[in-house]
Amino acid sequence: MRNIRIGVVEDDPASCQLVLDYLNRYQQENGEQFTVSVFDDGARIVEKYTPVYDILLLDIEMSEMDGMAAARRIRERDDKVVIVFITAAP
């Protein structure tokens, strides 16, 4: 079984916990193994980003650097990572 490396970038603690709960549930139900790193703003992941992740879950709206800006910066260093935008907004 391959370990899937996931970065979760979410500034709202409750929303972040919900995403982590979903990931844990998926692991248990499907026999997958994730290594998950959590960042509380786009700026946090961008400042020291290296292409080690398979998937990034980026919140669209964050205070310092939003997910769209973070994705643009990450794409300059990593053209292979899967980026999924998440939001709690309706």
Image (spheres, rainbow, N blue to C red):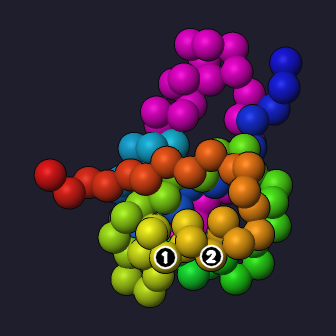
Q: Look at the picture and state if 31 lies above or below 48.
A: above
Q: Look at the picture and state if 50 lies above or below 65.
A: above
Residue 16 visible in the displayed image: no
- Three-letter code for the amino acid on which mark 2 is drawn: Arg
Residue 29 at what x, y percent from top left?
56, 13
Residue at the spot 74% in from the left edge and 49% down from the top edge: 80
**In this view, which residue lies farthest toward the bottom?**
64
Residue at the spot 55% in from the left edge and 67% down from the top edge: 71
Question: Which is more toward the observer, 46 or 73?
Answer: 73
Q: Quick one: SS at disc 2?
A: helix
Residue at the spot 71% in from the left edge and 72% down from the top edge: 76
Residue 73 at what x, y percent from top left?
62, 76
Which numbered tag is attached to residue 73? 2
**Which image quadrant for residue 88?**
bottom left
Residue beneath disc 1:
69
**Which image quadrant for residue 47?**
bottom right
Q: Image check: 75 left or right of 12?
A: right
Q: Quadrant of the N terminus?
A: top right
- Three-letter code for the amino acid on which mark 1 is drawn: Ala
Tags 1 and 2 in contact by the CB under 8 Å rule? yes
Magenta-span inclusion, residue 24: yes
Residue at mark 1 to residue at mark 2: CA–CA distance: 6 Å
Residue at the spot 49% in from the left edge and 48% down from the top edge: 84
Q: Which residues are magenta?
A: 21-41
Residue 61 at what x, y percent from top left?
34, 70
Q: Image check: 60 left or right of 29?
A: left
Residue 63 visible in the displayed image: yes
Magenta-span inclusion, residue 60: no
Residue 30 at what x, y percent from top left?
61, 13
Which numbered tag is attached to residue 14? none
